[in-house]
Image (cartoon, helix red, strand yellow):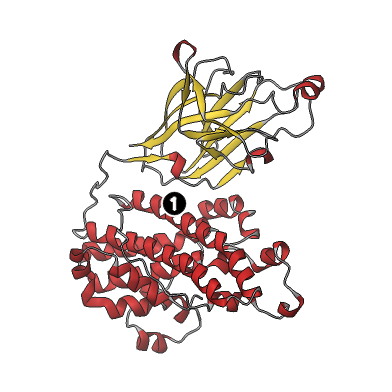
């Protein structure tokens, strides 16, 4: 547990605009106390009379166990690698959704005090994911940063969690997470991933500071993580305030849409030269020492169009044979019905002058092929696509090589033969 759960939720409240503060302020004590509920009620054997002494409706705010659904089994499968290294935001989304749906019910019934308690519980879930020593497992820390002999007995969980970093998000302006519950769920997932990544990036520097007897440095780094949790909680509370009339309204300026570049993938299969994940807005040049080409596609009349989007590269590892299937893919978690179609331009980055062959782009929804392109190569103009999603929950973008190099071509060109796939300006629309 973090030692600053109540600070996080109060700082989130302080960041709200004045009219939103008026909405929440009658129940500030409930906001603070409920931020500790997941720890207070962690003992599932607590007698009912003890729970009632704490909160007469305690059971309403106790987080449920993981669901025994096909969807959650799929989540477990897709995140099995992620949990080896630390927290998995998608595995915790059932808790976020529980808080969100509970808060929506309270909006519609006018139970503002109960809504506030769901905000407190939500903030705890967020802070637990963003806590650096949860974001990255201590076992991983010991592998990348072996403890000095004098620190072998230092228990990392307790010493990192109990840094008691102050929380301060002064000047932050909360943003809306969407205009209806399905949009908010997807944006909550995106926000939770961001919170986890901030905490994960800070874990090793925090432990290094502790090993170097620089405790204040560790505290200041921990503060960055706690602040990120507070900002996300402020966004959640601000969104509920906007929806306080209990209706699902569209507060997005340009209608419902989502830039896929900014939305996290759940699972990816990509070349190690791309760090096993899709690239955003660039095409990495293999074995270049860190150079890259701008993400580009071939436009009309041979023009090279620099674009924003998602770059893909299938594994270039052996075996080198015509029969070996090379495919890159990224899978995304959607809430069915939130968006109705995927729009993008697809093509091969023409800036890799020696690449050759043909590739096929595919969109797969819940295991079924929704779209497959004609063969496309570096010399071919990019293709505009609009793909109906049909209430898809698991959307996979894939790029499959239809041509593989011979051993002689590999020897002559090394990795320069490879085609770098581009999903330009990819977005989900209503």
Q: Would residue 389 be seen by someone viewing this image from the given angle?
A: no
The number of discs equals 1
Q: Would residue 275 be seen by someone viewing this image from the given angle?
A: yes
Please indicate whether residue 319 sits to the left or right of residue 362 in the image.
right
Q: Position of residue 162 (x, y in %)?
A: 53, 79
Q: Position of residue 22 (x, y in %)?
A: 18, 70
The C terminus sits in image quarter = top left
State the residue at coordinates (37%, 39%): 339
Residue projecting furthest to the top: 301
Quadrant of res 283: top right
Is label 1 in a helix, a strand or a loop? helix
State the residue at coordinates (37%, 42%): 337
Looking at the image, residue 342 lies above or below residue 220: above
Asked whether 45 or 313 is in front, the reply is 313
Looking at the image, residue 186 lies above or below residue 198: above
Q: Position of residue 428 (x, y in %)?
A: 39, 37
Q: Which residue is mark 1?
A: 190
State the residue at coordinates (54%, 15%): 380
Quadrant of res 33: bottom left
Q: Position of residue 173 (x, y in %)?
A: 29, 58
Asked whether 247 or 188 is in front, the reply is 188
Quadrant of res 404: top right
Q: Mark 1: few, some, or many residues within 10 Å (few <14, many ≥20)?
A: some
């Amino acid at each position: 547990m973090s030692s600053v759960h109540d600070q996080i939720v109060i700082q989130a409240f302080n960041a709200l605009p004045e009219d939103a503060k008026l909405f929440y302020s009658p129940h500030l004590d409930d906001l603070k106390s409920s931020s500790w509920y997941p720890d207070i009620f962690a003992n599932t054997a607590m007698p009912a009379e003890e729970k009632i002494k704490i909160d007469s409706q305690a059971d309403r705010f106790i987080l449920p166990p993981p669901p025994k659904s096909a969807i959650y089994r799929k989540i477990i499968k897709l995140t099995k690698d992620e949990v080896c290294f630390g927290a998995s935001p998608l595995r915790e989304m059932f808790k976020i959704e529980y808080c969100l749906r509970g808060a929506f019910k309270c909006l519609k019934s006018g139970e503002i005090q109960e809504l506030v308690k769901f905000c407190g519980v939500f903030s705890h879930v967020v802070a637990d994911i963003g806590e650096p020593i949860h974001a990255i497992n201590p076992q991983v820390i010991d592998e990348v940063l072996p403890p000095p002999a004098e620190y072998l007995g230092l228990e990392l969980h307790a010493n990192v969690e109990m840094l008691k970093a102050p929380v301060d998000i002064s000047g932050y302006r909360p943003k809306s997470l969407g205009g209806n519950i399905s949009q908010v769920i997807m944006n909550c997932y995106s926000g939770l991933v961001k919170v986890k990544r901030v905490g994960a990036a800070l874990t090793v520097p925090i432990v290094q500071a502790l090993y170097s007897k620089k405790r204040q440095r560790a505290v200041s780094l921990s503060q960055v993580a706690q602040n990120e949790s507070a900002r996300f909680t402020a966004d959640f509370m601000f969104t509920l305030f906007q929806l306080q009339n209990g209706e699902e309204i569209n507060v997005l300026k340009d209608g419902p849409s989502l830039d896929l570049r900014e939305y996290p993938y759940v699972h990816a299969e990509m070349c190690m030269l791309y760090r096993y994940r899709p690239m955003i807005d660039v095409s990495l040049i293999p074995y270049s020492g860190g150079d890259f080409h701008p993400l580009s596609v071939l436009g009309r009349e041979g023009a090279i169009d620099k674009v924003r989007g998602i770059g893909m590269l299938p594994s270039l590892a052996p075996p080198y044979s015509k029969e070996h299937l090379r495919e890159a893919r990224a899978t995304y978690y959607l809430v069915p019905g939130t968006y109705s179609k995927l729009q993008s331009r697809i093509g091969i980055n023409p800036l890799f002058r020696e690449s050759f062959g043909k590739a096929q782009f595919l969109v797969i929804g819940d295991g079924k092929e929704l779209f497959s392109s004609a063969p496309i190569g570096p010399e071919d103009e990019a293709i505009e696509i609009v793909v109906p999603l049909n209430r898809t929950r698991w959307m996979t973008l894939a790029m499959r090589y239809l041509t593989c190099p011979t051993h002689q071509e590999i020897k002559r060109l090394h990795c320069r033969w490879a085609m770098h796939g581009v999903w330009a300006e990819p977005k989900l629309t209503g």
